[in-house]
Image (spheres, rainbow, N blue to C red):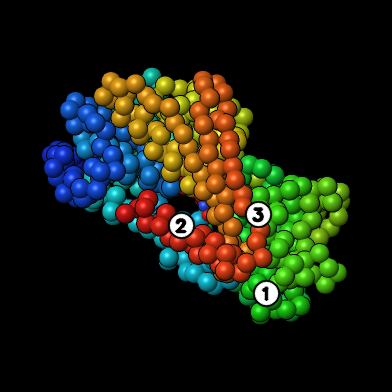
């Protein structure tokens, strides 16, 4: 077994000489102090030996690393992430009509490594030995952890749709539910779709990551086709009877696509009206819904159902499909010193969003830091600000709060969705808010 301390990394130079409070303030600016980023006694009694290991260098994992460092200059922080780059999903629907490029959503780990002195190991986490507090990696190394934060995102459960699988998603039937080659493939298929062709978007039942994103995608695709292929049709086949912002998207759809008329370019079919896709017939390029209707499509985008990440499932962190946690600190209810955040969590009523994953990260690192300093762990209050767009000039937002109600109880949710408005200026402001939030968010987590 290779011990953590024997792993070779240029960052070990930094680890040997932990950042002093003065050095950290120099790097982060005095604003860090005025925003209360340093716990009152963080530096008074640091537990320098503590090793915080994080599985997954996506939104939840990267936010955990950055905010852990802002709270505590002395702990060792290691992220395990197989990919050398991370590609953000928030805002990525814009890549499909060509309003943005994949490069704009791609970040590296350089700042986390160099500015925040986080050790990043590009490998896959495999197995947790709970009694020894060890994490085995695919490459053969074993790390000793004091606290393990798990944020590996979801598993896309392609097989939840009969006849569908990962290979088909990577080929003719892209899911494109994590930004990457499938997103580009979906764009290219739409660009080359035959004149007057039919594009189908299949939406799963809850919960899945980013509830409004399928409808945003449908809007963007229809806008794109209206320009380059005006006779085309887009159908959303839905495994639900309602969706978030279903009072707002149709306002845009009616105005621009004739939604609700016989000539509408865009149609939404709810579960009750036979919209739930249960099967893919890859040979005939068709999907079949629960009522047996066959829908032929020239482009078929199946957003698959989801479960907790494979890592969480095989390491006994889940009950059924998702990982139960204590909402006070997001510690696993199943194993000690393990914290699960992000899309893998059984978080109902919290939706699966990057906004929440990053706020859950803040709750966890504050709790860990408090524990390391012998302080009582506080009571969390989480917020989610969900944004979406129907077009570049038409945005929408939702504000949500989640209050801790006590051990074993779900979080109490309150939310506010503004009514749709006739004011084009207001819709434009909301679209700009959405885009700006996404940009700022991408910056915040990785810089
Ligand atoms: C089209 C789309 C649009 C979206 N828009 C928004 C939006 O506007 N706002 C918003 O808040 N959210 C949005 N989201 C949702 C958001 O992307 C997710 O909720 C968020 O990424 C969840 O964070 P996470 O840390 O759980 O997972 P991720 O960010 O996916 O990170 C998981 C990481 O774990 C790694 N990993 C997996 N298994 C292992 C393993 N065994 N070992 C090591 N590493 C592993 C993966 O490689 C990955 O890098 C959107 C999602 C989609 C699909």
Q: Nearer the viewer, residue 406 or 167?
A: 406
Q: Which residue is mark 1?
A: 225
Q: Quadrant of the C terminus?
A: bottom left
Ligand 1 lies under 8 Å from the Cβ of mark 2: yes
> What is the number of callouts on the image?
3
Q: Are marks 3 and 2 in contact (CB under 8 Å)?
A: no
Q: Which residue is denoted by mark 3 in the rendering?
A: 419
At 79% across and 56% down in the image, what residue appears? 269
Q: For the point 21% across and 38% down, which residue is it?
A: 73
Which residue has dot 2 on it?
437
Q: Residues within 10 Å of mark 1 (few under 14, many from 20)?
A: many
Quarter occupied by residue 394: bottom right
Q: Position of residue 150 (x, y in %)?
A: 43, 36
Q: Is residue 203 left or right of residue 64?
A: right
Q: Quadrant of residue 20?
A: top left
Q: Are marks 3 and 1 in contact (CB under 8 Å)?
A: no
Q: Secondary structure at mark 2?
A: helix
Quadrant (top left/top right/bottom left/bottom right) for the N terminus: top left
Q: Describe residue 323's horizontal placement relative to residue 190 as left or right.
A: left
**Residue 216's quadrant in the figure?**
bottom right
Q: Position of residue 348 (x, y in %)?
A: 60, 34
Image point 61% across, 69% down: which residue?
424
Mark 3 / mark 2, whichever is N-terminal: 3
Is residue 435 placed above or below 399 in the rendered structure? below
Sequence-wise first label, 3 or 1: 1
Give 155 or 74, whichever is nearer the viewer.
74
């Amino acid at each position: 077994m290779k011990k953590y301390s024997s792993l070779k990394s240029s960052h070990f130079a930094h680890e040997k000489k932990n950042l002093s409070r003065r050095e950290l303030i120099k790097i982060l600016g005095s604003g860090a102090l005025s925003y209360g980023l340093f716990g009152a006694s963080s530096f008074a009694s640091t537990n320098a030996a503590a090793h915080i290991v994080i599985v997954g260098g996506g939104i939840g994992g990267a936010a955990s690393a950055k905010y852990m460092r802002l709270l505590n200059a002395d702990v060792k922080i290691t992220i395990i992430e197989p990919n050398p780059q991370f590609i953000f999903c928030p805002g990525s629907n814009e890549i499909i009509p060509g309003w943005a490029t994949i490069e704009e959503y791609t970040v590296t780990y350089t700042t986390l490594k160099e500015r925040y002195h986080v050790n990043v190991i590009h490998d896959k986490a495999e197995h947790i030995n709970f009694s020894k507090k060890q994490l085995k990696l695919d490459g053969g190394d074993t790390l000793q952890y004091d606290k393990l934060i798990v944020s590996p995102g979801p598993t896309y459960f392609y097989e939840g749709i009969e006849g569908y699988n990962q290979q088909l998603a990577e080929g003719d039937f892209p899911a494109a539910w994590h930004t990457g080659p499938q997103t580009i493939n979906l764009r290219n298929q739409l660009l080359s779709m035959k004149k007057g062709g039919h594009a189908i978007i299949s939406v799963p039942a809850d919960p899945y990551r980013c509830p409004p994103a399928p409808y945003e995608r449908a809007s963007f695709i229809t806008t794109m086709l209206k320009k380059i292929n005006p006779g085309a049709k887009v159908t959303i086949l839905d495994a639900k009877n309602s969706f978030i912002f279903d009072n707002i998207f149709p306002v845009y759809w009616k105005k621009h696509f004739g939604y609700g008329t016989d000539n509408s370019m865009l149609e939404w079919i709810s579960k009750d009206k036979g919209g739930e896709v249960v099967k893919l017939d890859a040979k005939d390029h068709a999907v079949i819904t629960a009522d047996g209707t066959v829908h032929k499509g020239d482009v078929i985008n199946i957003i698959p159902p989801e479960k907790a990440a494979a890592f969480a499932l095989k390491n006994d962190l889940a009950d059924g499909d998702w990982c139960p946690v204590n909402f006070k600190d997001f510690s696993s209810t199943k194993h000690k010193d393990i914290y699960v955040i992000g899309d893998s969590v059984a978080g109902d009523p919290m939706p699966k969003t990057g906004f929440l994953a990053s706020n859950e990260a803040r709750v966890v690192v504050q709790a860990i830091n408090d524990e390391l300093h012998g302080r009582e762990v506080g009571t969390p209050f989480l917020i989610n600000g969900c944004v979406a767009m129907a077009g570049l000039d038409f945005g929408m937002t939702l504000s949500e709060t989640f209050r801790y109600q006590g051990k074993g109880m779900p979080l109490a949710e309150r939310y506010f969705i503004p009514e749709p408005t006739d004011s084009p200026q207001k819709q434009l402001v909301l679209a700009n808010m959405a885009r700006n939030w996404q940009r700022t968010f991408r910056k915040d987590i990785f810089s």
